[in-house]
Image (spheres, grey):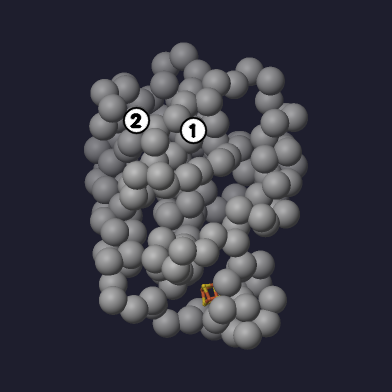
Amino acid sequence: MTDDDPDGGIGGVHIKYLLHCPRQLWLYARGGYRPEQRSTTVAFGEAVDATTYTRRRDVDLGEAKIDWVTTGAVVHETKSSRTPSPQHQAQVRHYCLLLTRMGVSVARGVVHYPLIRRTTEVPWDAAARAEAEATEQAARDAIAADRPAPRLPRGRCRGCSYRDYCWGDS
Ligand code: SF4
């Protein structure tokens, strides 16, 4: 999945960072430095994305890009991770929310984990929409804060591109 934020909207990366570390989201949105753009993890993810599924259509929402949407508006997202995560489901819910606002009748979402050959279903109903809207607002609140949130415990910073900024190493 690729994602960008040309219009100041909340995209999938914002949701991912919020749920991992609100400080990471603030630095990404306010700091003007986006180290993830040169992350090998992202590059690998994009490679998996490009080679694993042949039946795909990109949908560009401005704030975010959906991997592809099949007939019936099922939102698919592919992850290079071997570990299914609630954060991944939250990202897909966010895409469902963006599509719904565009008038698309979204049925549900699916997170694909090709490296472990698993999928996770993401329901899309009134409760899921409320959760997605609350998460989006939490992201806006975190970005609007005057200062970045406190650091996470260092053990949870593994793999974060802002370690140099936060901890003086990389
Ligand atoms: S290095 Fe740790 S505290 Fe700093 S942004 Fe990354 S996850 Fe958050």
- The residue lying furthest to the front in this view is 32
Classify mark 1: helix, strand or loop: strand
Residue 8 seen anywhere in this rendered image of the structure: yes
Front residue of this view, candidates 60 and 119: 60
Tell me whether the residue at label 1 lies in contact with that at label 2, contact meaning CB atoms closer than 8 angstroms: yes
Q: Please tell me in which quadrant of the rendered image residue 93 appears.
A: top left
The dot on residue 156 is none
Residue 2 at x, y = what percent?
56, 41
Q: Amino acid at mark 1?
A: Ile
Looking at the image, which residue is at 33% across and 64% down?
Answer: 143
Above or below residue 146? Residue 28 is above
Image side of residue 121 versus residue 133, left or right: right
Q: CA distance from mark 1 to mark 2?
A: 9 Å
Residue sticking out furthest to the top = 71
Circle 2: element type: helix
Q: Position of residue 30 (x, y in %)?
A: 39, 66
Q: Nearer the viewer, residue 158 or 113?
A: 158
Which residue corresponds to mark 2? 99
Where does the image place residue 33, in percent across and percent down from the top left?
52, 64
Task: Say which residue label 1 marks.
Answer: 66
The quarter in which the N terminus is drawn is top right
Residue found 50% across the figure and 43% down from its top: 3
Q: Is 167 left, or right, of 121 in this rendering?
A: right
**Above or below — where is 126 with respect to 54?**
below
Residue drawn at x 61%, y 68% is 160
